[in-house]
Image (cartoon, rainbow, N blue to C red):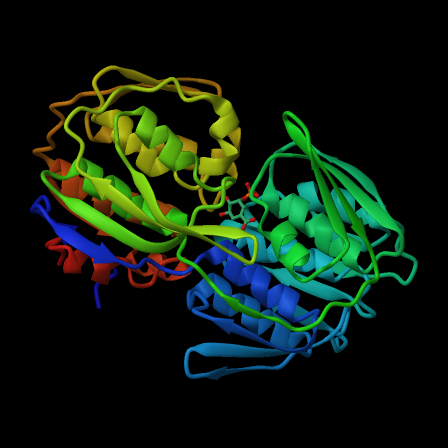
Amino acid sequence: MPKYILINQTIKSFKKQIRVAADKSISIRSILLASQAVGISKISNLLESEDVLNALNIIRKLGINYKKKKNDYLIEGFGLNGFNIKKKTTINAGNSGTLARLILGLLTKSKFKIKLIGDKSLSNRDFSRVIKPLELFGANIKSKKNSLPIEILGTDFLRPVFYNERIGSAQVKSCIILGALNTPGVTKIKARYSRNHTELMLKFLKYPINVIKKSNHEIISIKGLNQFKSFNYIIPGDISSAAFFIVLTLLSKKSQLIIQDVNINKSRIGIITILNKMGANIKLKNKKIYKGENISDIFVKSVKTIKGINCPSYLNSSAIDEFLVIFLMAAKAKGVSNFKNLSELNKKESPRLDIALNFLRMIGVKVKRKKNDIKIYGNPNLKIKKKIHIKSYLKDHRVFMMSSIAALCFGGSWKIEDKDSVNTSFPSFLKLLKELGGKIN
Ligand code: S3P
């Protein structure tokens, strides 16, 4: 089977209602928290992608059983630190930064050394950001150059920490919150704003966690050593997966799309704010609140004139996984778009800022870069007539999906490698594109 796709035609107009893949961040958190609850938790509509299956594999390796019953996953936890860890255990987080960083938080009290490994992309990523706070708790960590493989050995003498989280990373914040669960006393985090699913889930579990919001940061206090009961959770759709279809609709002619039941947590919908500032008219309808999370249907229509944007960098964290498709909008905008302080983009599954610049230049869009700021000179008449070959960039799923959307909207004759990368976060991506009429070989 070829590992690439070919796209030689733009997509025709469509009018449909779809559901996208379940939320990856919430899927992983629900598994990890179920592994620490007392009793059997039931997770419905879990995302069945590689990152999430790796989370299930890891908890099983750590002694937690689960089974699938119809559409539900049943996970049996034995309370905080209820893992049954064997000597010489190695766990593999595959491609997932979230899984790798969050699981370390749960291992601060492990009796034996555990080795954490990952794939080539994950092994290139920085772990100093979690090693620092984990060492403050008292965990013993061994790593070469602050990257995977990492060995962690827990301690019975954990101490609460006060940590200033300056990156605005939910992975770092969540790692510390999970570390705090096993730690006596109150752990405090001063955190720059980032997605808050871990906090919301713990609140819904009635765990003693308190969040005080300030203008540009929040103070989170977590009281350790409180048990919580097993729970039921239905995972909503993922805005980061919906993003590809939102931009596809905006850039296609005379099209309309409704995406049902998507998580629209404020800390995740930077893309909607940004696209609406660029002239889109995306509406959120049928809003509801589920266990502290906001969920709604997303209504989106093609847009005639796209405006360039001076993107305020306070939106960066809430749109961090969506910039690749936001750049496609900027490429077709009337006017210049500015994006600032995007250093974190280069720390994802692949160096996405570098890749986006090469990509935009390759499709004939003028871009300028100054350190981590970029300027995209939009061209409302952008049409691609040449052959484009997108090679595999560390198997980055979002680079593959962004390229597919560009091919279906801008024309040209595309060969895009590494179609299996979608299994990381959105296994039904190509099937859904075909349902909307995309011609993909
Ligand atoms: C995630 C947080 C973000 C995001 C990632 C998922 C999470 O990473 O890019 O895809 O689930 O916590 P950072 O927290 O490192 O910015």
Image-based side of 317 in relation to 398, left or right: right
User: On screen, 322 above or below 379?
Assistant: below
Find residue 215 and report its horizontal and vertical position in percent: 64, 25
Place residue 435 in its image quadrant. bottom left
Of 92 and 15, nearer the camera is 15
Residue at image coords 22%, 68%: 1
- Does residue 396 appear in the picture of this structure? no
Residue at image coords 43%, 59%: 236
Image-based side of 69 in relation to 376, left or right: right
Residue at image coords 10%, 54%: 439
Image-based side of 13 in relation to 424, left or right: left
Find residue 113 and report its horizontal and vertical position in percent: 78, 66
Find residue 371 and report its horizontal and vertical position in percent: 48, 19
Find residue 270 and report its horizontal and vertical position in percent: 43, 35
Callout count? 0
- Does residue 165 appear in the picture of this structure? yes
Residue at image coords 53%, 67%: 233
